[in-house]
Image: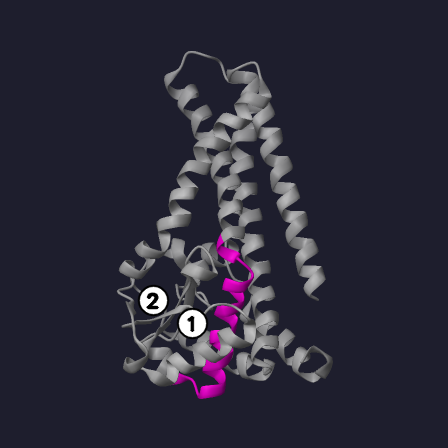
């Protein structure tokens, strides 16, 4: 299962890179007469913005959700679970934060293992039992171990570069004097949509991967499945009213209202499918 997820993720990245090169070829040839230089220039612009996000987005996220980094004395039970799970995963102990929110959820942030933070809401601590909490922490530790922040930053860089190219063409069309070829116009409409869909597909694959890896770390797939059932039910019944939907991919389950648009562009796979795979995993002791 793990190798299948990795192969699909690599395939999605390859497709996105080919899409980027194709768009760069069209844009570079149209504006600069040199598709290579055009591609490099647009990628550089996107990379600058995403490097800034990569290094500083965790501070924005913690501030946005008023998460407080705690010491061991403030919640020794939670702190010890995170410490034990990190030890089992063979990564450094991440910082621990609590979000003052009744809606049960959790997320991990930080650019690497040395700067990682695991955050849980007050609602999650009240809802889950110890085994379920350990499963959720293991899922978030798996994201850290798998360097998902880096993976998604690369995906965002390529998608951002394609979107930036499209905006340049629209700007030229509305404010410039050059005639835009219909093929170029069609490319600029479809390419950003395709890039976003690929980025979201990568995000969904990383969730499956974190579920599997997290279940292996905590050695209890059923506990993680039970936690996901509770979290999915609570977040569906009482979705988050504030917050930023752009940060939905951070959470273990999507906390925002499930409109048709949100479902179509979901950062998470269906909870039912995730739970089903974990139940199957629990029945196969070779995973543990």
Q: Is residue 230 in sight in this rendering? A: no
Q: Quadrant of the N terminus?
A: bottom right
Q: Where 14 falls versus 280 (above or below)?
A: above
Counting from the top left corner in percent of width and height, residue 131 is at 49, 86
Q: Which residue is mark 2?
A: 240
Residue 60, quarter of picture: bottom left
* Residue 80 sits in quarter: bottom left
- Is the residue under label 1 in contact with that under label 2 (CB below 8 Å)? no
Decide whether the magenta segment is chiefly helix, strand or loop: helix
Residue at position x 53%, y 46% in the image: 155
Please tell me whether residue 131 belongs to the stretch shown in magenta: yes
In the picture as drawn, the residue positioned furthest to the top comes out as 177
Which percent across, then down, holds residue 265? 50, 53
Determine whether, in the image, residue 3 is placed left or right of residue 236.
right
| Residue 23 pos. (x, y %) | 58, 29
Q: Nearer the viewer, residue 25 or 90?
A: 90
- Above or below, 143 against 154 in this view is below
The residue that disc 1 covers is 236
């Amino acid at each position: 299962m793990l190798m299948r997820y990795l192969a699909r993720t690599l395939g999605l990245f390859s497709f996105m890179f080919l899409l980027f090169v194709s768009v760069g070829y069209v844009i570079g040839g149209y504006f600069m007469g040199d598709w290579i230089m055009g591609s490099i220039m647009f990628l550089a612009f996107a990379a600058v913005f995403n490097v800034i996000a990569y290094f500083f987005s965790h501070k924005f996220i913690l501030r946005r959700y008023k998460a407080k980094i705690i010491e061991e004395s403030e919640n020794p039970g939670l702190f010890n679970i995170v410490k034990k799970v990190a030890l089992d995963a063979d990564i450094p102990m991440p910082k621990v934060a609590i979000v003052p929110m009744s809606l049960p959820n959790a997320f991990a942030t930080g650019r690497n293992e040395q700067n990682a933070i695991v955050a849980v809401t007050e609602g999650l601590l009240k809802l889950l039992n110890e085994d379920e909490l350990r499963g959720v922490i293991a899922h978030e530790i798996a994201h850290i171990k798998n360097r998902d922040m880096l993976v998604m930053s690369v995906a965002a860089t390529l998608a951002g570069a394609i979107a930036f190219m499209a905006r340049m063409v629209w700007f030229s069309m509305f404010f410039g004097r050059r005639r835009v070829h219909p093929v170029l116009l069609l490319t600029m409409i479809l390419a950003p949509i395709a890039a976003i869909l690929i980025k979201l597909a990568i995000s969904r694959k990383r969730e499956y991967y974190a579920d599997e890896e997290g279940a292996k770390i905590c050695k209890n797939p059923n506990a993680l499945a039970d936690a996901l059932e509770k979290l999915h039910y609570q977040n569906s019944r009482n979705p988050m009213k504030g917050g930023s939907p752009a940060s939905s991919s951070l959470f273990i389950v999507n906390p925002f209202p499930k409109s048709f648009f949100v479902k179509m562009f979901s950062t998470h796979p269906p909870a039912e499918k995730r739970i089903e795979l974990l139940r199957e995993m629990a029945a196969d002791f070779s995973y543990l």
